[in-house]
Amino acid sequence: MNQRLLRGACRIGTVSVAFLALSGCFSDNTVKHSIEDYAERLSRVLDTPLPPSFDDNIVRPLPTLADSASLRHNIEPISINLREFYALQDCELGTVVAERNTSLGKSQLPSQRLVHESKLLTVLKECEAALQNEQSSGNEKLAVTIASWRKQKTIDYAKTWANLIQGSQELRLALNTPQRLFSVENNKDSLSSVNALFYLTTVNNAANLATPINSSELENQLHIVRSGRLPATLWQTQQTLAHTLSELTHMLSPKLEAISCPDGRASDQAKILRNVFYLFFIEKIQPVGSLVNQYHYKLSPLWEKWLNEPSLHNELKRYIENQTQEGFAQYSDAMKSHVSLWQQFLGRCNLSPVAPG
């Protein structure tokens, strides 16, 4: 039996029987379906139409991320004349510079460009030190030239790192194109994604580069970032919850207020509504909200670093700031308002949000 038939089978029978069978019927635990089923059940019990927005796809795309070309830094390679090139034959610098000037070097992906720049900085430092230790006026002059190159490439390194964050396919997908929403169960790769994103931040430190970046490690971490797409998943989930819960709170407010509970005695309808609240919101939606909170706060130190990083473009910073501050605030307000509405109703009817018996 396919998912659609399973979901349809769960709606057959009386409302009270359907409540008891819910846990056995649903095999799809995405928060999108939990929200849809929550809304449909509330609509049926209250005999009221759903908000118009529930007629469309309730999962809306994230705001568009600025085009990578508009965020990219243009970085000029080191220019070495033939005399300098031959003078550097005993130093690895000549080889590294030559690698950059090949057709393959000129078409490197942002990740491999960062690896190259880290190697270049390392050999610049080593070559400068070697020349300074040799007693030759020509070498001293070349050492001064190399020192000026190293200073410039230290500045360029931060721009190269920014090009990786702003322009690589892995990061753009992770920041703007989720494959799914959070669910109660299927989030096993999220913590690996957090660690991978923090790893990418640690390689943005030219001053502490004792050795070149490990290319395999960098590519592995980027693969994790692309596979998990944690930031976009987090932001689209919080956006979906903010939108749908606000709509449902608006729909529920007058309906719950109209339900009579004389002397705190709950009617059958009030008890059914409490069951809906427990089975869908408490059991399925609120745990996803807890995941949103958890990963929002896990990633907050990362975003703080990025927002204070001069090499990152202001357009990217505005995008991140909108999601992590305004977007999270809207989600938090929607969640609090929805819970508060139910607390008032359940309190008035002397009910507690417990599992239906």
Image: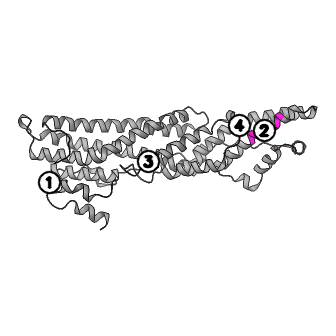
Q: Which residue lies under the disc numbered 4?
A: 210
Q: Secondary structure at mark 2?
A: helix
Real-space Cα distance between discs 3 and 1? 35 Å
Residue 332 visible (yes or no): yes
Which secondary structure type mostly characterizes the magenta part of the structure? Answer: helix
Nearest to N terminus: mark 1 or mark 2: 1
Nearest to N terminus: mark 2 or mark 4: 2
Magenta span of residues: 120-129
Q: Residue 291 at what x, y percent from top left?
A: 38, 42
* Few, some or many residues within 10 Å of mark 1 (<14, 14–19, 20+): few
Near-viewer residue (230 or 60) = 230
Near-viewer residue (71 or 81) = 81
Residue 64 visible (yes or no): no
Q: Nearer the viewer, mark 4 or mark 1?
A: 4
Q: Amino acid at mark 2?
A: Leu
How many callouts does the rendering have? 4
Q: Residue 141 at what x, y percent from top left?
A: 88, 32
40 versus 84 height, above or below: below
Magenta stretch holds residue 12: no
Q: Secondary structure at mark 4?
A: loop
Q: Which residue lies under the disc numbered 1?
A: 16
Q: Nearer the viewer, mark 4 or mark 3?
A: 4
Nearest to N terminus: mark 3 or mark 1: 1
Q: Residue furthest bottom?
A: 1
Q: Which residue lies under the disc numbered 3?
A: 233
Q: Residue 148 at what x, y percent from top left?
A: 79, 33
Real-space Cα distance between discs 1 and 2? 75 Å
For the residues labelled 4 and 3, say whether their Cβ atoms are less than 8 Å apart.
no
